[in-house]
Amino acid sequence: MRLRAILHAFHFSPATVDNQYQYDALILGSGAAGQSIALLLAERLRVALVTKRGLADSASSLAQGGIAAVLDTTDSIEAHIRDTFTAGAGLCEAATTRFVVERGSEAIAWLIARGVPFTRDDDPEQGFHLTREGGHSHRRIIHAADATGAAVQTTLSEDVLAHPNIDIYEHHIAIDLILGERIGHPELGCAGAYVLDIRNDRVVTFSARSTVLATGGAGKVYLFTTNPDVATGDGVAMAWRAGCRVRNMEFIQFHPTCLYHPQAKSFLITEAVRGEGGLLKLPDGTRFMPAHDERAELAPRDIVARAIDFEMKKHGLDCVYLDISHKSADWLREHFPNIHARCLELGIDITRQPIPVVPAAHYSCGGIVTDLAARTDVPNLYAVGESAGTGLHGANRLASNSLLECLVFGEAAARDILSRPAAPMPALPPWDESQVTDADEEVALAHNWAELRQAMWDYVGIVRTNKRLQRARNRIRLLAHEIDEFYSNFRVSNDLIELRNLVVVAALIVNCALRRHESRGLHYSRDYPATLARARDTVLKPPRFRHRPPR
């Protein structure tokens, strides 16, 4: 840790005139997507990596299960594609799905070459241990015990910290993108971003020929979530304001098994626990999943989450229980050391007791519309990871396809950025605070934040109705008006920026949900319980949307 701190100290460049930084590439977000792109670009370009908190604060670092890829001779590309389509309820984009799955083994090889310590199989001849998760027809999840995301993030972070061409800006949050057309240079597309330096309470300007949104998901729009506090939908909101289309925002994946305990904040119990034989039970020990789906505990997440929600409401329960105590204690400590340790801290011995669990908002399957090079509708603006709507996940993400998507599209974005000719960048106008003052009180922000998350949880959750969605839309409109008024009159703060973004994302989720007159995947409507014969994306265009010019 001391070496990290020393290296970190040398990764900040002095600001130029008017607090303006100039780079070849600006990456917003430091998860697996952002860090992998930074490393790929830094071989030839100067890169700024901007992150709201610390370098390791991302959803990627919390991923437990692993990364899905075809790595075994008994598995196949076609089987992985088929499983992805089945989980995605027919809405996955065919070209995107094949593009990602076919590049899975290359992505894993890249991580192995960088030193990610994936778990080895007991049989040395088998190489790495592959587990199976819900929705997968084969064992194809390569993992590092039950903390794969942390292992990937730690490995990439060490390389990022040591790279001379990457400057890291922690505790910096992007406010908005800078568009060339708004500063008299329409040929630039996206020219960078205005960013709040949280610790010094000043707004700085980042100028870059290419900007990448790798800001993660928007789980904090809900009251209960497995996401970290940084998951406030910043990339989607900024892209929408910049004129980018979004799609399929109604498909919010609720992870079926989040640890239920008053002292545990958003601790996820990995899908692999069910993949390795964990059973879901009622308090009296009765299994219930076989009555909901023939695949029982190995059904896709949306089915399992709805089943748990149904049983909790039917029996008036606060939670259900995930039991894997029939496995040996040594086996559990070896395969799920972090879950075992965390539960033990809370007085739950998973070798003898079932784990109390509830569903929680976990993953946004939709996002900013992108192509196979991760390009958005705005030239020189890219989106990768959970903020992007690539079409891979369809109506429901297949377990462990998320980190895979980050890596594959991270490489695609880097390749496209490196192929573009260098061009001089003009000086950008500084942030203008001449018309605003310091906020007289912050209590309104706290109230609006709480009201928004509660409304989304109550009205836009696992099971939806038109009446609930309309109630949510009415409340969101009122909140958006209040927040916009606050933003127009007072200096920006971290809380204001995040709340401004969350209310945009909330509106997008609700508007997409109201447009889908069917139940499909993660979107279940009591008003439209049937699934239509033809699967169609829900695409929203912002008021200032323009078709992207040919490239």
Image (tube, rainbow, N blue to C red):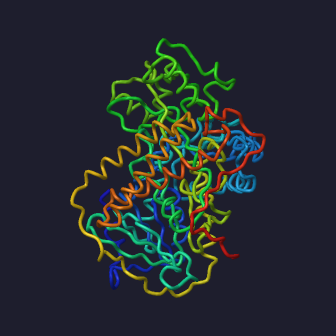
Which quarter shows the N terminus? bottom left
Q: Residue at x 71, y 57 (%)?
A: 99
Image position of 449 with respect to 121: above or below? below
Badge count: 0
Name the outermost residue toward the top: 284
Which quarter shows the C terminus? bottom right
Q: Nearer the viewer, residue 117 or 342?
A: 342
Instruction: Estimate the x, y position of residue 326 in percent, counting from the top left.
Output: 52, 18
Instruction: Estimate the x, y position of residue 118 in percent, counting from the top left.
Output: 54, 46
Image position of 273 with respect to 452: above or below? above
Residue 349 is drawn in which quadrant?
Answer: top left
Name the outermost residue toward the left: 440
Instruction: Estimate the x, y position of residue 40 in percent, counting from the top left.
Output: 55, 68
Please indicate whether residue 415 sits to the left or right of residue 358 in the image.
Answer: right
Q: Nearer the viewer, residue 414 or 444?
A: 444
Q: Residue at x 61, y 35 (%)?
A: 525
Residue 353 is drawn in which quadrant?
Answer: top left
Please indicate whether residue 138 sits to the left or right of residue 511 in the image.
Answer: right
Q: Residue at x 56, y 60 (%)?
A: 384
Instruction: Estimate the x, y position of residue 220 in percent, counting from the top left.
Output: 42, 47
Image position of 55 with respect to 413: above or below? above
